[in-house]
Amino acid sequence: MDKESVKIGLIGSGTIGSGVLDLFRNNVERISEKIGVTLVLEKVADRDLPKLRALQLPEELITTSAEDILQEPEIDIVIELIGGIEPARSFIVSALEHGKYVVTANKDLMATHGDELLALAREKDLNIFYEASVGGGIPLIRPLKQSLVSDRIHRLVGIVNGTTNYIFTRMYQDQMSLDEALAEAQKLGFAEPDPSSDIEGRDAAYKLIILSGLAFGNSIDPDQVYVEGIKGVTYQDIAYAKEIGYTVKLLAIGEKLPEGLALRVHPTLVPDKHPLASVLNEFNAIYIEGDAVGEVMFYGPGAGAKPTATAVLADVAEAARSIRYQCANGIIEKTYSKTSFVPIDDLITSFYLRFLADDRPGVFASLAEAFGDEEVSLDMVIQKRRYGNTAEIVLVTHDVKEKAFQKALARVLDIPEIKPNPSVIRLLA
């Protein structure tokens, strides 16, 4: 299919879709010149007709039916930007069945159905491009597929959710509560009206699945990722972490261990000297460790219409090159292999623990006994404040297996003087 012009259909004209249209209008001639093929916007579909007309597109370009794009033989590339699982999955399947390349920013879909969709693309001698599904405008997918393909990656650690990173930044810098920082993030458009996917860690987990599949070459089910959100983190925890040389971040961590893959998303105390500690506000960063390359970090705006649109149009350009120069697939993922997964209980880390206790003699002795019996060694124990007859205690453990720490914590909470609902945050090794 050697073509001098490539026609594009866009499904979805929301925040990202409108950003793609703006960037396309402004840069289409420059992009076309760079890649040696003329890009033509053939059709834009959205069920909301008034929203489409507000984009000031020519009337012949707009439609309320995705089928007008999927079944149009002249369209070569379909951009899917509606998000969610269905009908996005069905649209992508239909696009491939009709011989079209696909560009998507859909992290939920690629994390949960990416294997099957990529297999269908291979079968049809096509490809799916999804750079915009992780990290907004930060190049991540392409480096993992191309630049680092010769290396053996054994660990990736990332701040991949801009909403939670913005919240933690505001909590520390402005002494806000989590709810206050979330409200500000929503006001500024960094958080959705329903922020549960961000706050509960699901958004970061989907992105971790995509990155880990590429980095480690394994098929991953969402149930194999340990996920813990940020609701339990308070301003006090962030302030105390800073006192002992750490910054709190929601991290997505993937590790290739001898026993298998360990994948987890949870609040983490990051040493202030680590490069991820300085990533603030809505920015994202991915820190990758490989046998040959050593340590590399990708940093930039992790969300937003314009940054994400740059990734979408970069994928469009790559798809157009494949069509123009008859490179059937470009670079497509191999079939992912199966592997074993290491449960969180078997991982070794250290812990920050903050709780309240009745200020009575013998409490520290009871704590020492509970931790000692489970072979949990303490690196530091600090009595921070006193509220009447109640003391606030902060402690940090040495490295310990998760299962042993949780057993020790259960014993601690059985001590009558210890108040319930402690703050527990893991440390980054």
Image (cartoon, grey):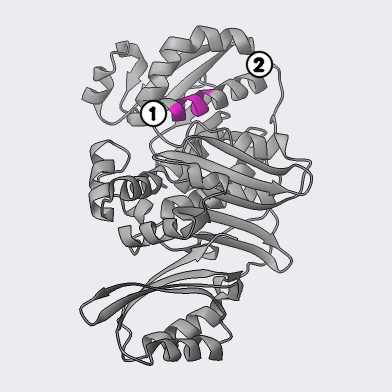
Q: Which residue is mark 1?
A: 305
Horizontal relation, residue 49 to residue 99: left or right: left
In-front residue for pair 326/306: 306
User: Which quadrant would residue 64 be assigned to in this image?
Assistant: top left
**Of 21 and 360, which appears nearest the observer?**
360
Q: Nearer the viewer, residue 421 or 340?
A: 421
Q: Circle 1 — which element?
A: helix
Residue beneath disc 2 = 324
Q: Residue 115: in sight, yes or no?
A: no
| Local secondary structure at mark 2 | helix
- The secondary structure that dominates the magenta segment is helix
Q: Is residue 2 above or below residue 198?
A: above
The image position of residue 185, as x and y in percent, is 28, 42
Q: Which mark is residue 34?
A: none
Badge 2 density bin: few <14, some 14–19, many ≥20, Cα 10 Å: many
Which corner quadrant of the image does residue 384 belong to?
bottom left
Asked whether the residues under the numbered discs 1 and 2 touch, taking CB atoms below 8 Å apart as contact, a structural biologist would say no
* Residue ID at (69%, 31%): 329
- The amino acid at mark 2 is Arg
Give percent across and percent down for residue 295: 68, 44
Q: Considering only vertical position in the picture, is 372 above or below 356?
A: below
Rendered-image quadrant of the N terminus: top right
Is residue 138 visible in this depiction of the protein? yes
Which amino acid lies under the numbered mark 1 shown in the image of this protein?
Answer: Ala
The quarter of the picture where the C terminus appears is bottom right
Image-quadrant location for residue 52:
top left
Q: Residue at x 53, y 46 (%)?
A: 276
**Mark 1 to mark 2 CA distance (whole Å):** 28 Å
Q: Earlier in the sequence, mark 1 or mark 2?
A: 1
Span colored in magenta: 307-313
Q: Position of residue 209 (x, y in %)?
A: 55, 52
